[in-house]
Amino acid sequence: MKQLSPASDAPPPTQTAVIVPVPAADSLVDEHRRHLDVAASWGVPAHVSVLYPFVEPAQVDGHLVATLAAVFGSVAAFDCRFSRTQWFGQDVLWLDPEPAQPFRDLTAAVWGAFPHHPPYGGAHDDVVPHLTIAERRLGSLSAVQTAEQAVQTGLPLSTHIEGVLLIAGTQAPNSWRVLHEFRLGTARNETR
């Protein structure tokens, strides 16, 4: 586990999230995310969400960090492949992780440790692991479809998932910062 300090000029955070960063996807999706994904404008890197929203920033303390470290230390690192794009209706374009189950397991483990913090505030019956590329509310359907075509030329994308981030910020541009970085447990190979 590694602790990182937020930038001194950042506004005080109003929310937190637990995410799996996917830096291997940066060169493929960043250009599109910068214009078509609101989280990117906040400074959130390409990722698959584990739990959002999470605790109030004031609740991040040594006990919470130790609990997360124990949760993530008991989950093995894994290989992942993104080979196709998917849509939520015609509203959100995303990359589909394969296998998705390790991400579901991470969400279940954190939610199990913090039962008062359901994924997406309990808004969805089924939490679908995904890496958001674009939201139609930020551009035309044509712009999102163009992003999809560009991203598909770079697929498949394979990566090794070995860490999870606890991040905090606001809806202000570039306000999200890493509070803690956690390592997953002993690796196992699950690339398909």
Image (spheres, rainbow, N blue to C red):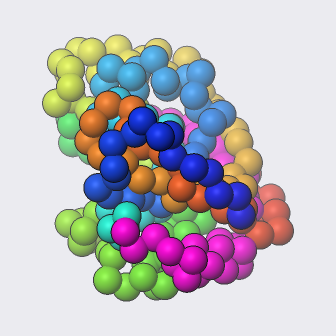
Tell me: 89 left or right of 165: left
Whether residue 124 sits left or right of residue 164 in the image: it is left
Q: Which quadrant would residue 31 be assigned to in this image?
A: top left
Of all residues, the one furthest to the front in this rendering is 8
Q: Position of residue 77 (x, y in %)?
A: 74, 62
- Residue at (47, 53) in percent of width and height: 167
- Residue 61 place in picture, x, y as percent: 50, 74
How far across and down, in percent of the image, does residue 89 sit?
21, 42
Out of 71 and 189, give the one closest to the viewer.
71
Q: Nearer the viewer, residue 175 or 83?
A: 175
Query: The N terminus lies in which quarter of the figure?
Result: bottom right
165 relative to 176, above or below: below
Q: Is residue 81 above or below residue 118?
A: above
Q: Quadrant of residue 134?
A: top left
Q: Residue at point 37% right, 64% down?
A: 57
Magenta residue check for 190 = no
Q: Which residues are magenta?
A: 58-85
Q: Is residue 15 visible?
A: yes
Q: Nearer the viewer, residue 164 or 48?
A: 164
Q: Is residue 43 above or below residue 33?
A: below
